Image (tube, rainbow, N blue to C red):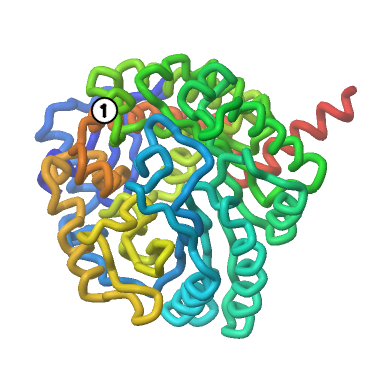
Amino acid sequence: MTDAADFHLFESELGRHLLLADGSRLYDIPDDLPTDIETLRALAQDVSPLGSRRIDGTALRPPPLQTLSLNVAQACNMGCSYCYAGKGTFGGKSKLMLDDVARASVDRLIAESRDGADLVIGFMGGEPFVNRALLRSIMPYAEQAAAAAGRTVRFSLTTNATLLLPEDVELLARHRTQVAVSIDGPKSINDAARPMNGGGSSYDRLVRGLLLFEEHGRPYHLSARITVTPSTTNLPGILDHVLSLGFDSAGFSPVLVSPDPSQALDPGDFDWMLDGMVACGERARQSILDRQRYPFSNFETALQEIDRGSHRPYPCGAGAAYLSVSADGGLYACHRLVEDPKHRFGDVWAGSDVQARAAHLQARHVDRQEPCRSCWARYLCGGGCYHEVDRRGRPACDYIRGWLEFCLASYVALKERAPGYFLDPDAYFGAAAAGAAQTA
């Protein structure tokens, strides 16, 4: 290791630390050690000898498929102001997936997966429950087909929760589905950004949908996805409100690309967003020390990734083990790139285009991207969402580095002071709850 981008010095309340980018390895640094670049470069070479690189610039070969997301409804009952699909209209090309396309998608996933694989099928829109009949038929079909082929299958679903019926909730609970609900905050904030096409409060309908989960069965995991626009500035207050609605976790996602440019964050907006994210992260960090759950998913995910030593040359599995199926059966890199011919990789009948997937992975390796190749955070970030980078570039790099710096410092402090959290979070919080119950 000789490039300064291969390591990063940071501080926590416990002292100084060194991150080796390749492998995401962390080391404590003595207080009396000089921090000039030559000393740190020599230290990095000492703890990680040349020739031991885990990421060496070699592109990933297309692996067997493991996950497909099905765009079961390229249509929506809402008209969100920032929607990448043109307020749910999909450029005037709204359509619903038919049963034969959904079954062919399941069959294609099984055919291109490993023996014994644990498969994931996600349901996307638009709003998936615009096409609820398909959901009810395809979930049992997928379970039966996977079992017959020696695979298992799990489900995820992203919804606005405004169309939920009791039988929908029972379906999701019965099939142990991970459900993500889109909500942007309290009623005034949510309704301003997420209007119903026919009028009325989307927030009120969403809350009614959440009550159905309590009455008819919770899914395997119920999370909230909070979209951040230039008007979403009070992140701690918004997060507190959303978590009060009973979600298992909640996290933020900034708008970088929108048909309405006023809804996308400008570079200057990332200063207040970072401040808000850190404020939420500090609450979550203190809650871990107090053994009280505060499930801020951005923070929890970062801690888990750092603890595993996660390091990757790509931002996600798009084009690798994950593809997305359009309503008419086309295979695309991900759900945000559906109908984009540059990211079409075959169809569910002929199969995935392995050569096109390989070319995608070759070109998108983070060490082939500028300015990513000179960034210490590149193997934690992976280079950024393909959809956002293609259309907007990388305006959020300083924000990402600032957030990761906070998460790294929080990790080393929590690893020292709350090691049980990383061994088994459920047991860590459960023991505290049980103790409190006995005391009461």
Q: Residues within 10 Å of mark 1 (few under 14, many from 20)?
A: few
Q: Eyeballing the image, is 378 above or below 325?
A: above
What residue is drawn where x is 63% and y is 67%? Answer: 139
Q: Nearer the viewer, residue 91 or 359?
A: 91
Q: Position of residue 169 (x, y in %)?
A: 72, 50
> Amino acid type of disc 1?
Pro
Q: Eyeballing the image, is 356 above or below 96?
A: below
Q: Eyeballing the image, is 438 above or below 209?
A: above
Q: Eyeballing the image, is 330 above or below 241?
A: below
Q: Secondary structure at mark 1?
A: helix
What residue is drawn where x is 47% and y is 39%? Answer: 303
Q: Quadrant of the C terminus?
A: top right
Q: Is residue 269 visible?
A: yes
Instruction: Left or right? Give the position of 420 relative to 74.
Output: right
Which residue is under mark 1? 261
What residue is drawn where x is 69% and y is 38%? Answer: 209
